[in-house]
Amino acid sequence: MTMAAAAVVARGAGARAATAAALRGGCGTAARGRPCAGPARPLCTAPGTAPDMKRYLWERYREAKRSTEELVPSIMSNLLNPDAIFSNNEMSLSDIEIYGFDYDYTLVFYSKHLHTLIFNAARDLLINEHRYPAEIRKYEYDPNFAIRGLHYDVQRAVLMKIDAFHYIQLGTVYRGLSVVPDEEVIEMYEGSHVPLEQMSDFYGKSSHGNTMKQFMDIFSLPEMTLLSCVNEYFLKNNIDYEPVHLYKDVKDSIRDVHIKGIMYRAIEADIEKYICYAEQTRAVLAKLADHGKKMFLITNSPSSFVDKGMSYIVGKDWRDLFDVVIVQAEKPNFFNDKRRPFRKMNEKGVLLWDKIHKLQKGQIYKQDLTLKHGWRTGAIIPELRSELKIMNTEQYIQTMTWLQTLTGLLEQMQVHRDAESQLVLQEWKKERKEMREMTKSFFNAQFGSLFRTDQNPTYFLRRLSRFADIYMASLSCLLNYDVSHTFYPRRTPLQHELPAWSERPPTFGTPLLQEAQAK
């Protein structure tokens, strides 16, 4: 678990610790098998009677609620920094002598207009080249519909969010623009678990019979939305169609927006509309250059496009900051395909034929070279900043703290099996379900957080943890750290561990013997 995903858990640990006494009916030490310092509190005034059990449960509920409310101000005084860098692995910047940068959404950030451009262009290609009904032109891009990291079942034409353990988050399965009822999802997949053989490969590709495609790239947001809109049109108009063909046609249309130069020409024609000026990009590059770091830029984009963008945000002399520039790299194959040697490119973007023996500063190259070195990876996740700001709000902290406390209360009080107690527990479960839906809508009404399902890390975060040693919201976060800074991942407790060594207070989420014994 990474810090972004664990932050609320860590806070919740404090919440659970603070409310443990209320939930235990005494001090917190009895839960770990040590005698309680204070007198034991009776479970009810007349044990075994239903009205008294009901009163007892609601008393515990109110005590836990009060303790949670008292805890919130202390949490609010220890908010998360949206400009921080988070680590999955221990890594020292002093060991890094060479920095490589992607172009899109690393050095350059785009405005909200870009995804609308991609959506509209791909939609028009579906109509004009793939002969889709002209009526789909009525659909417009909704930037609030999808999030990155979602999976798309190509054969069933449904979009969904899956956690790190291949479980579907119920309530996040969409056919077209409408949510699929939980009962239908469970019937469709014979449960909520997606077998490994149906999942896409490590790079999110659907191949070898796999039916699930994962959308990891920021550029995939218009693709997911267009898929959902066209599905919606066919469903609303009772048009019989083959979902596999639709997926391929939308994928090809999105691809053509890039490879036919539609996107590149539009951005170059109105660069101020589509590219967000970022003066801190130059500051980061200058800082690294001043400390003697080598730098290279590697991108799938064409040379002229990169030159105009970098000239806009960094300056005409941007190439002086880089030792090597590699364009049209065709990543991710760039990193493992030995068959395509580098080619030098002149100032006009014309490929030269001479053999490349070494890479020279100031030159631009196309194609690739297999990388056999142990590269350390840093990921830029723009959504991280907005999610952290949401997590820092008082409403979110109050909701999450109480949600975790209520979950602990349910876990402990489930030992009371009488009918009256079970009715109370059902009310708590209903409240918990409503609160889970509320926390999801804090981030995205349809799919929730990029990093977390109800309780588990998302499949996106699982891949991020494997790919990236560190991750941050933007490149400018590097300005907050010395070039010799060491990043240490925070050790978070496993389910079977007591976090006595943690800087956070312990939780009370483990089953407690005294509740079972009392029953």
Image: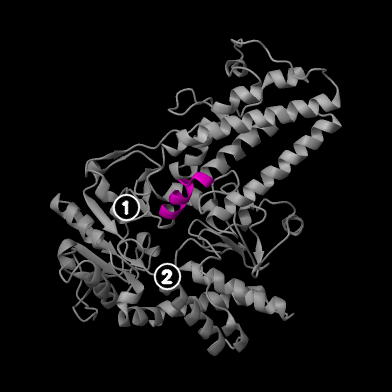
Q: Quadrant of residue 146?
A: bottom right
Residue nearest the viewer, comparing 202 with 7: 7
Q: Which residue is located at x 21 percent, y 78 percent?
A: 352
Label 2 sits on residue:
112
Q: Which residue is located at x 24 percent, y 79 percent?
A: 349
Q: Quadrant of residue 514?
A: top right
Report x, y in % for residue 346. 19, 78
Horizontal side of 444 relative to 4 (left or right) equals right
Could you classify mark 2 by the number of other residues whose Cα lies within 10 Å: few (under 14), some (14-19), or many (20 or more)?
few
Q: Which mark is residue 450?
A: none
Q: Secondary structure at mark 1?
A: loop
Q: What amino acid is found at the position of numbered circle 2 in the picture?
A: Lys
Q: Secondary structure at mark 2?
A: loop
Q: Quadrant of residue 184?
A: bottom right
Q: Are marks 1 and 2 in contact (CB under 8 Å)?
A: no
Q: Which residues are magenta?
A: 385-395
Residue nearest the viewer, comparing 410 with 104: 410
Q: What amino acid is found at the position of numbered circle 1 in the picture?
A: Lys
Image quarter hosting the C terminus: top right
Label 1 sits on residue:
372
